[in-house]
Image (cartoon, rainbow, N blue to C red):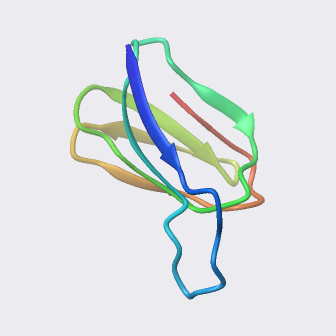
């Protein structure tokens, strides 16, 4: 497993601000949450499969899928 992430120290008040970029190779058992983030986060699945839970719904994920996490929403993904 490896993770590279760079978090920008300041957020501007513009319409769109990138505050974090990175790439991560996860073990098959990797998961995040349940938890709440304070920002939007776009994930792109390069390989493998998993699921994303938000708003009482579960979505199946596989290579080529993209999902968006929203601020102030309880989420879980693996």
Which picture quadrant has residue 27? top left
Q: Which residue is situated farthest in the front direction here?
A: 9
* Residue 77, image x, y percentages: 55, 34
Which picture quadrant has residue 55? bottom right
- Name the residue nearer the viewer: 33 or 52: 33
Question: What's the residue at 40%, 43% (across, down)?
Answer: 22
Question: What's the residue at 69%, 32% (across, down)?
Answer: 33
Question: What's the residue at 48%, 12% (across, down)?
Answer: 29
Q: Quadrant of the N terminus?
A: top left
As drawn, 11 above or below 63: below
Looking at the rendered structure, the number of numbered marks drawn on it comes to 0
- Name the residue nearer the viewer: 5 or 33: 5
* Residue 67, image x, y percentages: 43, 54
Which picture quadrant has residue 39? bottom right
* Residue 20, image x, y percentages: 51, 53
Question: What's the residue at 42%, 26% (across, down)?
Answer: 3
Q: Is residue 51 left or right of residue 56?
A: left
Q: Is residue 73 left or right of residue 77?
A: right
As drawn, 35 above or below 24: below
As drawn, 70 above or below 47: below
């Amino acid at each position: 497993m490896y993770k590279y992430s760079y978090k920008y120290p300041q957020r501007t008040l513009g319409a769109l601000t990138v505050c974090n970029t990175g790439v991560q190779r996860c073990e098959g058992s990797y998961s995040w949450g349940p938890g709440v983030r304070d920002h939007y986060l776009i994930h792109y699945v390069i390989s493998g499969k998993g699921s994303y839970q938000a708003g009482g719904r579960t979505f199946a994920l596989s290579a080529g899928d993209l999902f968006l996490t929203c601020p102030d929403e309880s989420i879980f993904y693996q």
